[in-house]
Image (cartoon, grey):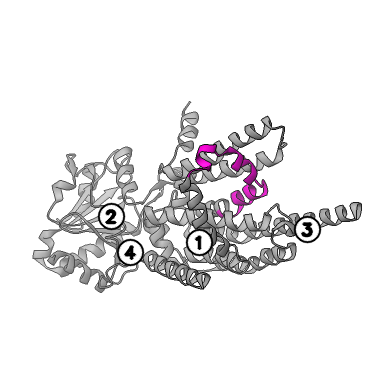
Amino acid sequence: MGEFDSSLAFLLPWEFSPSWTLACLAGAGLYVRGLLHRRRCGLHEGFWRPFAFFLGIVAIYTVSQTHFDYLAQYMFFVHRGQHLVLHHLAPFLIALSAPLAILTAGIPHRVRNLPTVTFAAQMLKPGYRLLQQPVIAPLLFVGLIYFWLIPQVHFDAMLSHRLYQLMNWSMLVDGLLFWWLILDSRSPASGGLSYGVRITLLLAVVPPQMLLGAYLTFSHNVLFDVYAVCGRAWPLAPLTDQRLGGLITWIPATMMSVLAVLIIIGRLLGKRSTMYRYG
Amino acid sequence: MGNAMYKTGCKTALLSGMLWLVGCSDPSWQTKDISELMPPLEFELVDEEARSVTEADYAGDVTLLFFGFTHCPHICPTTLANLAAISQELGEEAQNDLRVLFVSVDPERDDPATLREYTDAFGPEFTGLTGDEEALQALTRRYRVTYGYGEKDDAGNYDVSHSNAVFAFGRDGDAQLLIREDDPKEAVMADLSRLLTH
């Protein structure tokens, strides 16, 4: 009974935040509406794409609105795990599921035609285009990881609720932008980025992440004293905490690039075989 | 043309955003200024005489808040001894207006009597406080700190992880400074005397 209670407590938010909860609920809700709407029109999505989408949403919710978030605030390595999910894993899954058509189908007609919605979309478009430039996107992707790990910035972000929220949201939004650009289901012919550029971007973001991860892993100094200042979730040697965090920043994060390169190569080969078959 | 203007706008927004993030704290404080980051002092705890106390009981004093436990081998005795030395050097008048609240996050071992014995060793301005899990969590959450317990050894001893910083509040109870373990004594002295003269 006690164990059941404590597992239940783990699932409750450490700091309830309407923005994360609403975003996850809205994403899942729109997607389900879209799925049902398309099913009525005879369009079936299969299993894997919706599965990847929901897995991404559940992952975001778990690291932001359960006690995982508590651990992420008081253990450096858990914090690195949280950002791995928010910046790499969950956006990767969501982008891979190519949910745009389904999400659009899920928006109620009344909302879709509201002048404010159209206006907001118009306003955001130039900014979106700018951030998705092949030079800016990888710089932003790597730059944000480095920025939030500048010790003074990291210190303030862990100490202030407002900055902490901003940090996590910026990681998620940037993650979505980057993986959306890379895993865009449109072929280069129909407006997507060329496959060569996508692979170049994926490879370009690897060395800076490896460098940072290795630096954290092999450093003999504790770089982030905020975890000593705020106390750790349980007594763990500061350098062990930092090394684990370094490994998370280094290995799984860069493996995501490798995985994405394989997917892009797969698409390239798929395109070739289609060309041979029909061309 | 529009695009160029747009880009300049974006750069300005990005730069000002970064400046905002790095913070516009008062540079004349030598330890960490947290006036923009942390809420005013507020708690409901139990003091060394087993009385219920709140922040109102210490209103008007410059208050230093430190979390620890009496079985702490290094950080707590060192920090409290340093604060005692600083308080001595600040002079008698300052001592009367300075209050150090040592909040034990290990209520299982630290009852009011144990706390009184422990804090008496450092000086009359030191007060031990503790509370139940709920009260301690409310306070630690408020200042975004935490604590945790290690495994018990055969003798029943266990380690406790806790914050190693001292939070300083002005006479009005507003959060002002975070004093870290490695802050030089002179810096702490200067900041505390400034806080005391406010």
Side (left or right) of B152 relative to A207: left
User: Marks 4/3: CA distance?
Assistant: 51 Å
Give neighbour class at mark 3: few <14, some 14-19, many 20+ (Cα, 10 Å). Answer: some
Q: Which residue is mark 4?
A: B180
Which residue bears the numbered disc 1? A239
Task: Tell me, yes or no, whether dots 4 and 2 are on the same chain.
Answer: yes
Q: Secondary structure at mark 3?
A: helix
Image depth: mark 4 or mark 3 in front: 3
Count of labels in the image: 4
Callout 3 touching callout 2 (CB < 8 Å): no
Q: CA distance from mark 4 to mark 2?
A: 11 Å
Looking at the rendering, the stretch of residues picked out in magenta corresponds to: A87-114
* Residue under pointer 3: A265
Alpha carbon separation for disc pair 4 and 1: 18 Å
Chain of the residue under the numbered disc 4 shown in the image: B
Which x, y percent locates residue A42?
72, 32
Q: Is residue B182 magenta?
A: no
Q: Which residue is mark 2?
A: B66
Say yes or no: labels 2 and 1 on the same chain.
no
Instruction: Give the amino acid type for the residue marked by disc 4 in the picture.
Output: Arg
